[in-house]
Every structure is written in structure tokens, then in C-alpha cells.
């Protein structure tokens, strides 16, 4: 009789302990983790569920590896881990994290390319990002890549991002080209892209892009040289877009196909990768009679002129107030 009582008490104790531990494990698995900021980590191809638990314990994301393992078994997560980089936020629970890993919902990183970068500069940014892999092997020309913010997964390829940038550029360019203004002095999308790249390098504020475009359009129609300083800088920098100094008077005499002070018409190709606003300005320029512009003394925009005499006055004012 006493033996039966001991057995009953033992089984009851085991049952109560199991019940209480199960409740504790469930709570540990579903309550928000005790971290103060987002953390990211990488799951390799051979990472086991036990190894994941040990790692999370070491990072103080979970407090009990046994509870973590128990709930993983009950939910059927132990053989479902997918490789990749994952993030856990302070508001997430261990269950939410493991669900992400089981479904392969890996962390999306971002890389930003501002308007006006050259292809050379974009390649540099891609190579500097250690979460990407591979070289840039895609054949691309200046102006091919659309500047924007792109998301990607850990160990995505650099070529993959380049292809997305190129597709985005020509998708947007094609749509804008189809709604272009009548009577533009260029016949192809590539020529419009060339002018857009010059506008991108000249514009200081968004609201002046269409006016700058009108100056160049007016000049092209009159067969005047564009005389765009950024084309000289591009030529002198050998296509890198990084000159590192102001232009000198002698620079304007530099013999180069891209020097629009020496050559009439558009340069042979774009001088950077322009953004949407500059492409739109090139295809829908303002209607003006302006042929000249010069930077304001405060460098917060440009002063536009119809006549050369007025333009010279603005240049003199600029030199008096450098």
C-alpha cells in the first residue's frame, strides 16, 4: 500500500513538474525576447536546431535551451531550418524567429545609390558591401543603372543588383519616353538619357531641373554648343566622375569627345546615372527663352538669362560674391 502511494506521489510530482515546465517553456517560447535592439545572425547550411539554441543562449536572446528545444520538437521546427541571414527584434518571440527561419524569410539588407553617381562609383559601392558576393561581370555602359535604394539578401550577387538597376532604368525611361514633349531635338532614348545625365550634374534643386533642360534644348535647337561644365569634369576624370578640384580656365580647351565647350551637340554618352526627375525634365522641359545660366553666389540654384549681356552681368556678380 505504501509502495503504491509512493508511486502515485512520484507520478503526480512528475506530472505537475512536466505541466509547470511545459507552461514555462510555452511562455518562454512565445514571450518577447529580452534584447534592446535588433540583432542579425547567419544560419549556415548545416546548422542544427540544437546549435541554434546554444547560439541564442550565448547571445542572451533566450534563457533556457531545453525549453527552446522542447517547443521546437512540439512545433516540428527541428528539421526545417533554412540557411540565410535572419533578424530578431525586441518585439519578436523565439517562436516568431524560428518561424522566419523555417519559412526562409531572411533579413533584407539595403544599399543606396544617390542620383548622379557614375557606373565607376556604383561598382565601387557594390564592391565595398561585404554582404554581397562575386564581381560585376555584366556588360554595362555609363547611364545604364537607375539610382535608388535596393534591398537584397546576404550573399546575393553584385551582378544581380546591377541587372535590377539596369532593368529599372530602361523600364522607367521607356515609360517617360512614350509621354515625351513634341519637338525635342533628340531622336532616341539614349540621347535623352545623355541630356538627363548633364541635367543631373547641373541641378541644385528639383524645381530648376526643367528650366535647366530648357536651356540645353534651346541651345541644341539653335545648334549652339552646350558648354556644360560637368562634361569637362567627366572627360578630365577619365569617366570616373571624381575630379577632386574646381575646373581651371585651361580645362575648357581640353581635347576630348565629351568636352561640350569644344564639340557641338550632345556628348557621345551619358556622364552619370541620372534619376527619375532629371530624365523627366529632359523629356518634358520647361518652355522658356533661356540660353544661359550661372550658379547663384550662395550656390542654392542658378540665375537664368535670355541674352548673353545679362548672362555676363550675372557672372560678374558671381565673381564678386564667390
Image (cartoon, helix red, strand yellow):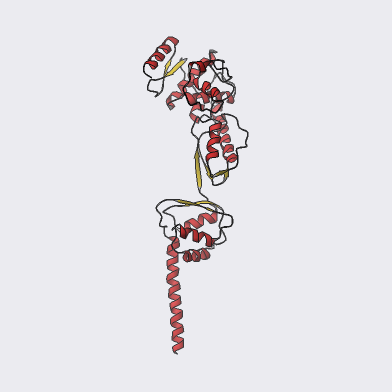
Q: Is residue 3 left or right of residue 259?
A: left
Question: In the rendered image, which quarter contains the C terminus?
Answer: top left
State the residue at coordinates (44%, 27%): 206
Question: In the rendered image, which quarter contains the N terminus?
Answer: bottom left
76 is higher (above) or lower (below) than 210: below
9 is higher (above) or lower (below) than 133: below
Q: Residue furthest bottom?
A: 1
State the residue at coordinates (43%, 74%): 17
Q: Depth check: 235 or 216 in front?
A: 235
> Where is residue 281 shown, x and y percent of the image?
49, 25
> Where is residue 4 shown, x and y percent of the image?
46, 87
Q: Depth check: 173 or 112 in front?
A: 112
> Where is residue 169 shown, x and y percent of the image?
56, 32
Q: How many marks?
A: 0
> In this orientation, does residue 25 appear?
yes
State the residue at coordinates (46%, 79%): 11
> Where is residue 178 shown, x and y percent of the image?
56, 27
Q: Quadrant of residue 171?
A: top right
Q: Depth check: 254 or 19 in front?
A: 254
Q: Quadrant of residue 49?
A: bottom right
Q: Residue furthest top?
A: 309
Amino acid at each position: 500500500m505504501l509502495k503504491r502511494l509512493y508511486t502515485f506521489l512520484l507520478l503526480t510530482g512528475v506530472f505537475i513538474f512536466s505541466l509547470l515546465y511545459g507552461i514555462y517553456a510555452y511562455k518562454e517560447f512565445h514571450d518577447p525576447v529580452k534584447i534592446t535592439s535588433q540583432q542579425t545572425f547567419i544560419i549556415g547550411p548545416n546548422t542544427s536546431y540544437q546549435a541554434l539554441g546554444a547560439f541564442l543562449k550565448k547571445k542572451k536572446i533566450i534563457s533556457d535551451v531545453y525549453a527552446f528545444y522542447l517547443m521546437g520538437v512540439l512545433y516540428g521546427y527541428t528539421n526545417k531550418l533554412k540557411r540565410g541571414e535572419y533578424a530578431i527584434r525586441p518585439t519578436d518571440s523565439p517562436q516568431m524567429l524560428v518561424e522566419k527561419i523555417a519559412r526562409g524569410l531572411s533579413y533584407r539588407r539595403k544599399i543606396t545609390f544617390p542620383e548622379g553617381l557614375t557606373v565607376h562609383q556604383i561598382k565601387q559601392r557594390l564592391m565595398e558591401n561585404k554582404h554581397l558576393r562575386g564581381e560585376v561581370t555584366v556588360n554595362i555602359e555609363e547611364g545604364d543603372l537607375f539610382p535608388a535604394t535596393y534591398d537584397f539578401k546576404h550573399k546575393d550577387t553584385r551582378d544581380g543588383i546591377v541587372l535590377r538597376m539596369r532593368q529599372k532604368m530602361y523600364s522607367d525611361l521607356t515609360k517617360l519616353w512614350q509621354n515625351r514633349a513634341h519637338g525635342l531635338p533628340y531622336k532616341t532614348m539614349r540621347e535623352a538619357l545623355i541630356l538627363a545625365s548633364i541635367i543631373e550634374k547641373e541641378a541644385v534643386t528639383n524645381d530648376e531641373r526643367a528650366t535647366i533642360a530648357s536651356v540645353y534644348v534651346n541651345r541644341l535647337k539653335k545648334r549652339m554648343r552646350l558648354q556644360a561644365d560637368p562634361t569637362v569634369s567627366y572627360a578630365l576624370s577619365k569617366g570616373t566622375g571624381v575630379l577632386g578640384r574646381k575646373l581651371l580656365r585651361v580645362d575648357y580647351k581640353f581635347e576630348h569627345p565629351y568636352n561640350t565647350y569644344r564639340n557641338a551637340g550632345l556628348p557621345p554618352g551619358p556622364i552619370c546615372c541620372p534619376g527619375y526627375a532629371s530624365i523627366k525634365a529632359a523629356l518634358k522641359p520647361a518652355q522658356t527663352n533661356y540660353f544661359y545660366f550661372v550658379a547663384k553666389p550662395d550656390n542654392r540654384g542658378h540665375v537664368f538669362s535670355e541674352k548673353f549681356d545679362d548672362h555676363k552681368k550675372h557672372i560678374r556678380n558671381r565673381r564678386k560674391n564667390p
